[in-house]
Image (spheres, grey):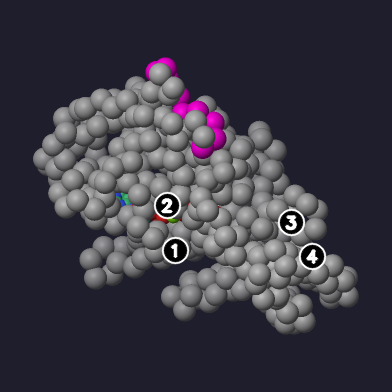
Amino acid sequence: MAKNLVVIGTQWGDEGKGKIVDWLTDHAEGVVRFQGGHNAGHTLVIGQGSNQKEYKLNLVPSGIIRKNVDCFIGNGVVLDIEHLLHEIKTLENDGIEVKSRLFVSPGCPLILKHHVALDQAREAKREAKIGTTGKGIGPAYEDKVARRSLRVYDLLNPDSFKKKLLEVMDYHNFVLQHYLKQDPIDVNQQFDLSMTHAEKIKPYLADVSQKLYEANAKNKNLLFEGAQGSLLDIDHGTYPYVTSSNCVSGQAAAGAGVGPHMLHYILGITKAYTTRVGGGPFPSELDIESEGAPGNQMSTKGKEIGTVTKRKRRCGWFDAAALKRSAMINSISGLCITKLDVLDGIKKIEICVGYELDGKKIDLLPLGADQVERCKPILIEVDGWSENTFGVKSWDDLPKNAQQYLKTLEKLCEVPIHVVSTGPERDETIVLKHPFE
Ligand code: GDP
Ligand code: IMO
Ligand code: MG
């Protein structure tokens, strides 16, 4: 019987989902994106030494590098076609066949020029910045929920597309001009651009639900690739400092068009410390600027620079109380702890095990930003290790203190660790229990 895996981020994104999805695709025949858009940045490092190649993917699923894997963009993704075409071209220039292997749901809401303008103008106006990626993600999801989105299949009927576009842009241009004091977006230009996109996207369109269902019927394993992270989830994250989609595992069903019984195993990707890009509360945050300080080591050794916006990621200690919330809302089967190697050489490692909130001690991240902003971290200290763990491939080769650190995390989060990642390359991975077996 086919086995399907959901890979999701358990923190504030950038946990290393791309690396792990790519690593796991030797056991899968299909990879599906089910939410988010090109706000995601998933980095894959393939090969060793001078043959090493880095790929940065935003919309194309991280299965594209392996020849026999089909890639799907499900209805839950908001789609900027211009960006997708650019990404496809970049992959093709690298000699990767995309056309015969990428399938896009006609149900994806489109990201159009006015979404990007609205996103950026609102962010500029906002006092407490969310720090969005400025890609139009939020406004595109708003239109979806408001039932005024233009979806991919609308492109196939130019007359009705134009009619809907005029109506929706009339509304958004009013807001842009009169409320946000911005230039309006030219409707005719947007229409012409969309019609060129229509021709180019046509060959990729497919009924994604049906294809996934058929793949399973033929015993093919599938991987559902989450974007962002559970603490950026629109419902469960540090609202309003979140993204505009559900990033939790349950969304894999709705955003790909499959039933929940098709999700067999949930792998929670978790950094051995914590990072966050953009605004919002972060109880275990550290100073990243002072040379030699642990936060600075995470930032520099971990190369914690955002893939999409090139901003420095904020860094902090591992937050077990936040992980407990993530484990709860995702039904995590096993954790994959990534970037363990980044902590090498830190003498004393701290772990956030709970918070003091309004004079009370709690061990679970509260909902929304307001309470989290008032949380003072309760930290415990454990011994670090001086040995190098970069590239270590077996549990037995890890320093005793690194093993102990992982066991402590496992106990605090109340979820078993099944995989440990010790480097960006596929094989720099320790398997304790293979998620596909
Ligand atoms: P994603 O958004 O969750 O896919 O994560 P990103 O790709 O944005 O960020 C993770 C970064 O860490 C990428 O540059 C990866 O190449 C890198 N990476 C992944 N796993 C490891 C690891 O175990 N060790 C180290 N040193 N780097 C890693
Ligand atoms: P991956 O898939 C980290 C953050 C932004 C901002 C907030 C809202 O690479 O893990 P948006 O543009 O989505 O409206 O921005 O969410 N954000 C991410 N942070 N990793 C991501 O994706 C992110 N996608 C969005 O920085 O704080
Ligand atoms: Mg990323």
Split into 4 quadrants, where in the image is the C terminus? top left
Q: Is mark 2 on a helix, strand or loop?
A: loop
Q: Earlier in the sequence, mark 2 or mark 3?
A: 3
Q: Where is residue 250 in the image (x, y as percent from the top left)?
A: 62, 37
Q: Which residue is drawn at 61% across and 49% down?
A: 244
Give residue 48's quadrant in the image: bottom left
Per the image, the residue denoted by label 3 is: 143
Amino acid bearing label 1 = Thr
Amino acid bearing label 3 = Asp
Count residues near mark 2 (Cα–Cα under 10 Å), then give few for <14, some for 14-19, many for 20+: many
Q: In this view, does 430 lie above or below 85?
A: above
Amino acid bearing label 4 = Tyr
Of circles 3 and 4, the one toward us is 4
Q: Do the residues labelled 1 and 2 touch (CB within 8 Å)?
A: yes
Q: Position of residue 425 (x, y in %)?
A: 31, 55
User: Left or right: where does residue 141 sit relative to residue 432?
Assistant: right
User: Left or right: where does residue 112 sit relative to residue 388?
Assistant: right
Q: Which residue is drawn at 38% across and 25% down?
A: 355
Q: Marks 4/1: CA distance?
A: 29 Å
Per the image, the residue denoted by label 2 is: 277
Q: Which residue is drawn at 24% across and 35% down?
A: 395
Amino acid bearing label 2 = Val
Q: Is residue 112 above or below residue 390?
A: below
Q: Is residue 368 located in the magenta-colored stretch of the structure?
A: yes
Q: Marks 2/3: CA distance?
A: 25 Å
Per the image, the residue denoted by label 1 is: 309
Label 1 near ligand 2 (CB < 8 Å): yes
Q: Which label is found at residue 171?
A: 4
Q: Which of marks 2 and 4 is nearer the N terminus?
A: 4
Q: Give the range drawn in magenta.
A: 360-369
Q: Where is residue 52 in the image (x, y as percent from the top left)?
A: 30, 66
Residue 308 seen anywhere in this rendered image of the structure: yes
